[in-house]
Image: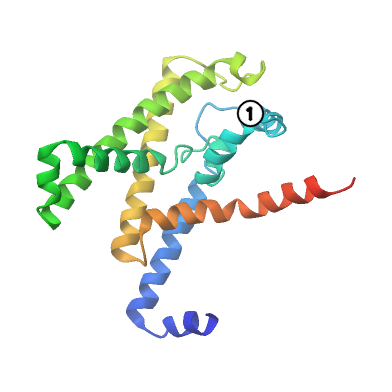
């Protein structure tokens, strides 16, 4: 496997695609550490440490895994690629029940590109809705065991959060498309894989703590 990887760098076009893929994934991972404006990161980290010790942290753990830890830190990529995945599933289901979409699906590449464009629109809509409710959730200290997560709550924070998180999701979607066009493999799948792989050290550390006798 190592020799195959080394040999791949001897092919100019393949080498270029591998480098582009690596750079784009690195950009995604850097974005997972850029905080959303107006959030008290220390208070948020304390809250997630608390729920990690309870069964209530299971759902957050799954969401956090697919966002590569961005959800836990509430970064600009906190929504991750989930709105796009949800939109893709919704469009696939609608294709089976709406004749117009079914006709598009049978038109080949042109129809696929139209459906993909609808998926992008649906992604933006879902991201706006999700980010708005996340902003409302963050503003309520009762949801965080009395901890104040938002420094300056109000419509200014809500609009900024919607803009930040929605833009983050759009940027991730764009990165995935760029990887697919200019890099190697399915871009969205690689983004998801990078997110999951990034959580392996944390998972191993938690497992070590769990199994430790002291």
Which quadrant of the figure contains the C terminus?
A: top right
Instruction: Examine the rendered structure and indicate whether residue 48 appears above or below residue 120.
Output: above
Determine whether, in the image, residue 92 is placed left or right of residue 46. Answer: left
Q: Position of residue 85 (x, y in %)?
A: 36, 43
Q: Residue at x 51, y 51 (%)?
A: 195
Residue 175 in view of the camera: yes
**Percent x, y of residue 102:** 14, 44
Q: Residue 92 at what x, y percent from top left?
A: 26, 43
Toward the front, the furthest residue is: 97
x, y percentage for residue 48?
65, 32
Quadrant of residue 155 within the rendered picture: top left
Q: Quadrant of residue 151?
A: top right
Q: Left of 138 or right of it: where is 123?
A: left
Give the residue number, with chain letter if any, for mark 1.
56
Viewed as shown, does residue 39 lie left or right of 47?
A: left
Residue positioned 17% across, 52% down in the render: 112
The residue lying at 11 percent from left, 38 percent from top is 99
Residue at the location (36% across, 26% down)? 129
- Does residue 53 appear to the left or right of 214 in the view shown? left
**Rendered view: 200 above or below 146:** below
Q: How many dots with numbers?
A: 1
Local crowd at mark 1 within 10 Å, few (<14), some, or many (≥20)? few
Coloring applied to the structure: rainbow
């Amino acid at each position: 496997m190592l020799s195959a990887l080394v040999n791949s760098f001897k092919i100019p076009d393949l080498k270029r695609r591998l480098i582009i893929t690596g750079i784009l994934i690195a950009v995604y991972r850097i974005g997972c550490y850029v905080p959303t404006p107006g959030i008290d990161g220390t208070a948020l980290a304390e809250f997630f440490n608390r729920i990690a010790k309870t069964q209530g942290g299971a759902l957050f753990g799954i969401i956090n895994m697919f966002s590569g830890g961005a959800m836990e830190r509430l970064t600009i990529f906190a929504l991750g690629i989930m709105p796009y995945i949800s939109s893709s599933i919704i469009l696939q289901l609608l294709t089976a029940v709406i004749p117009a979409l079914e006709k598009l699906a049978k038109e080949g590449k042109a129809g696929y590109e139209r459906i993909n464009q609808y998926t992008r629109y649906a992604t933006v809509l879902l991201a706006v809705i999700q980010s708005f409710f996340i902003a409302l959730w963050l503003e309520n200290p009762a949801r965080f065991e009395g901890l104040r997560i938002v420094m300056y709550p109000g419509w200014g924070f809500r609009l900024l959060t919607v803009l930040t998180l929605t833009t983050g999701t759009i940027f991730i979607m764009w990165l995935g498309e760029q990887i697919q066009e200019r890099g190697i493999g399915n871009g969205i799948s690689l983004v998801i894989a990078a997110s999951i792989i990034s959580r392996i050290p944390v998972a191993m550390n938690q497992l070590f703590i769990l199994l430790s006798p002291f």
